[in-house]
Image: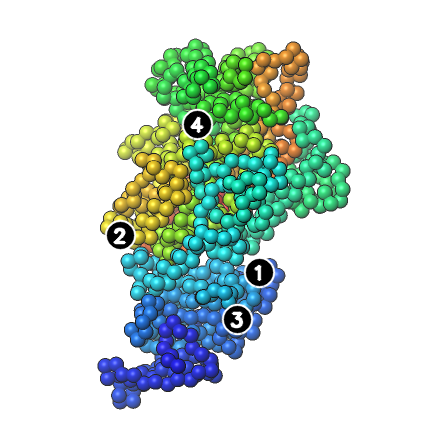
Amino acid sequence: MQVHINSHHFSLRTYYKGIEKKGGSKRVWGVFPSRSKVVMASSDGNNNTKSSQRVKAIVTLKQNGGGLLNGVVDGIDELVGKKLVLELVSNDLNPKVNSEKGTTIKGYNVHKTNENENNEVLYEASFEVPPEFGEVGAVLVENEQHEELFLKSIVIDGFHNNNGSLNFTCDSWIQPKNNDKASNKRVFFSNKCYLPSETPKGLRKLREEELEELRGNGEGERKSRDRIYDYDVYNDLGDPDLSIQLKRPVLGGSKHYPYPRRCRTGRPHSNKDPLSEKRSGSFYVPRDEEFGERKQKQFTETIVSSGVSAVLKSLDAIFTNLNIGFPSFEDIDSLYKEGYELPPLHATALNIIQNAIPTFFKPANHRDNLLNFDAPQPFKRDKFFWLSDEEFARETLAGVNPYSIQLIKEWPLRSKLDPKVYGPPESAITSEVIESQINGRVEQAISEKKLFMLDYHDLLLPYVSKVREIEGTTLYGSRTIFSLTSKGTLKPLAIELTRPQINNNGQWKRVYTPSSSSSSTELWLWRLAKAHVVAHDCGVHELVSHWLRTHASVEPYVIATNRQLSAMHPINRLLHPHLRYTLEINALARQVLISAAGIIELSFSPQRYSMELSSSAYDQLWRFDLQALPNDLIHRGMAVEDPNAAHGLKLTIEDYPFANDGLLIWDCLKEWITDYVNHYYPNPSTIESDSELQSWWNEIITIGHGDKSSEPWWPNLKTQKDLIHIITTISWVASAHHASVNFAQYMYGGYFPNRPAIARIKMPDEDPSLEEWENFMTNPDQTLLECFPSQIQALLVMVILNLLSDHSPDEEYIGQFMEPSWGEDPIIKLAFERFNKRLKEIEGIIDSRNGNIDLKNRHGAGLVPYELLKPFSGPGLTGKGVPYSISI
C-alpha cells in the first residue's frame, strides 16, 4: 500500500516504511497503528535528524439545550474517526501526488478538555506536522456520530513559525456521515481572506467544490439538514389543496406579478393548482440559517413560530364573530389596565393560546384567560396623542414609516392611471383648497419647497373595487397634503379620498380639510379621513417599506452570497453579519404572516390582495439604486446634492429625524466599507478580474431580481467605488433601513387608534343611506369605532407588533463586536475600531439632538424622542438599536 501525507487517509492497521531522496536528503514516512499519528524524520546524510512539529487543535462544540450534546463526542479518546475526524489541509500541493488538493494530515488523541460558561465544550486533537508541510489553510471535519454537531471554532497552536494561533471560525452544523455520499467531509478555511486569484494552490479545488455543494443541482425537495442555497418564485403563499379560496397568484417569474426570488424548497406541486407548491412539510431554510438556541427560545415564547397558526385555526372556537368591534374607547383603554379576557374556551383551545402567546399571560393575575398589554410609550406620555394633527404629520418624519413623505414638484396633481378604467385623472385638491390655508399662492409654495404629500392614489386605486367585494373592509386611493411651517414642522392641509368608477357607479372623490373642522360634522369627517389614510399608510408600510424593501429584497442577496462567494472571500466575510437569520424569519413570514388567510390578509385593508399589492409596488417603485439612503431622499425631493453641506446633501426639511440620523449611519457604514474594500482591492482590475464577485453581482441581477434584470439603473461593478456603493446599499437596507421601519411598530401601533391596520367601513358621506347618515350624525364616535379594526384584528396585530419590535438577547448590533476574520488583519482591525468609535459618537449626537428644544419633531411635551437609529440597545422593546441584519 502506498501511503503519503496527502488526501488519502492513513489506515490504522497498516504499516509502511519507505525512503526517498530529494536533493541529497532522506525522508522517512511512517504510519503507526498504535496511535494513528503521522511522523516524519528528515536526514541530511550525517544522521542529523529534524523532527516534525507537534501541534494541537482546540475544537469548540456548542451544547444544545439538553446538555452535553447527548454524548455526541464523549469518549473520543482512543481512535481517530470513531466520532469526530479532523484533518489539516496545507496551502501547498504535494508534488509527489497527482492531486488538485493540498496535503492533509489526520489528527489523533482527541479528548475533552473543558466546558465553559457559554454552554460550550472544548476538545483537543494532536497532529504531527512535517517541517515541509507548509502553512495550514483549511481543516476537514467528518462527523461519524449519529447526531448532528454544532462546530463553533477550531484553534490550532504550536507552529514554530506562526505568531499566535491559527483560527478557524466555523459556526456550522456538521451532519452525520452518510454512506450514500462520496464524501462526508466538511471544509473550514482559516480566517485569512483570499480573492479567487490569490487562493493557495492547495485550497483552490476545495474552494470550488464547497461552492458547488452549496449551489446544489436544483432538483429534489430540500431537507432540514441540507446546506443548499437556490432560488424559486413565491408559489407557496396559497393553499389551494386545503380550499380553492386560498389559491393565490405566483409572485415572481412573470410580467404580471414581478417579485424578488425566495429560497427554493422543492416541495411537490399542488393537486389543484400546478403552479403552486404544497404547503405541507417544512418551510426549508439551509441548516446554518436557522435561529440559534437563544434566539429560538425567545421566538418560540411568542406568537409567530407555531402559535399563530394554531390561533388562526382556532378562531371559530375563540370568537363567534370576527367582525365584533370595541364598544367604546374606554374598552380600548382598558386593554392596558385590566387586560383582555378571552371568552370561555375548552381546555384544549385555551392551551393553544397560552402556548402561542405565553408572554402575554402573567401568572400574577391567577386568571389563565386574561391577556395583558403594556401601554406604548406615546400613549403613556399623552393619552390623546393619536387625535393630534401635529402628531399625524410628525410621524411621517419621525414615525415608523418615514419612507413615504415626498415633496410636491408639480401642480395640479394628476393620476397616471387609465381614465377609461378609473375615471377622470384630475385631483379634487384645487389651488383654492390649499391657498385658503397657507396665505399665499400654491406655485410660490412649491417653488419654496413648502408643500409635501403622502401619495397612495395610483398604488391603491386599482385594488379598490376588488377589495370592496370582501366583507368587512374597504379601500380608497388617497392623497394627503402637508405644508412646512416656520417652526420646521409639517401641518396637514387636505386629504383626498377617491373611489374609482365601479359597475354603474361613477368615480367618487372628496377632499377633507382640518380648516373646516370648526363644524362638528366636518371635524368628525376629518378624523375619519385620517383613519383611512393611516390605514393606507399601515398597509404600504408593512407590505412595501418593511417587507418588500427589506425582507424580500435582501433574500436574493443572502442566497447569491452563499452560492457565489466562498467563505474565504473578503466580501462574503464583510456581508456575513448582515445576512444572519434573514432566510429563517422570511420562511416564518411565509408560513403565518403573508400567507393566504395569514395575519396580514386578516388584519390589513387590502386583505387577500395584500401580496399582489406588494408585487405592484415592486413593479412600479422598486429600484436598487434608490435603496441607497441619499438617492432615496433626493428621489423623493427630501434632499438635494450640496457639496458644502454635511453628508453632501441639503435636506428640504432640516428637522427630519429619520434622515438626519440615517445619514450619520449611512456615512459611517460607507467609511468602514470603503476602508475594507480598498484594502482588498487596490485597483479596478482586481474588481473586474474577481470571478466570484462578478458572478455574485450578475446572479443578483439576472436571477435574484431577475424580473427587473433589463432595467438600466443597475449599477456597474467595475471599480472600487462601484463595489463600495453596492455593499453600502445592501448593508444599509439590512441594518438601518430595517431598524427604522421595524422596531417602533409597537410604539406607534400598539395603541391601534393611532395606526389602525384596516379601515372596515366607507366614509359616511360616500353615497350614504338615510340610516347610515343619521347614525353618523347621532353617534360619530361609534362610526369611528366601527371603522377601526375588530377586536380579533386589533389583538392579533398588537401581538405581532409586540413581537416584531422586540430585540432578542443575542442580537448583534452594527459595529458592536468584531468578526474574527476582521481582527486578524491589522489594517481591517484598525478600520473596524474607527467604525465602532464613530458609532459610539453617533449615539451621543442623537442624544444631543433629542435634547434640542429647537427641533420640534423630536423634542416637546409628550413626544417620544427619536432613537430608532441609535446603534446599540439591550434586549426587549427599547425603540432603539440597529442590528446588523433582518433577524425579526
> Which residue lies under the disc numbered 1?
64
Residue 225 relative to residue 835: left or right: right
Question: Dots 1 and 2: beta carbons under 8 Å?
Answer: no
Mark 2: secondary structure = loop
Residue type at tag 2 = Ser
Res 812 visible = no
Q: Which residue is drawn at 41% across and 67% down?
A: 139
> Which residue lies under the disc numbered 3?
83
Q: Real-space Cα distance between discs 3 and 1? A: 17 Å
Q: Which mark is residue 405?
A: 4
Residue type at tag 1 = Asn
Q: Real-space Cα distance between discs 3 and 4? A: 60 Å
Which badge, 3 or 1, comes first in the chain's sequence? 1
Q: Residue at x 37, y 31 (%)?
A: 633
Nearer the observer: mark 3 or 4; the answer is 3
Mark 3: secondary structure = loop
Question: Dots 2 and 3: beta carbons under 8 Å?
Answer: no
Total labels drawn: 4
Mark 4: secondary structure = loop
Q: Residue 689 carries which label?
A: 2
Quadrant placement of the N terminus = bottom left
Which badge, 3 or 4, comes first in the chain's sequence? 3
Give residue 49's quadrant in the image: bottom left
Is 727 drawn above or below residue 19 in the view shown? Answer: above
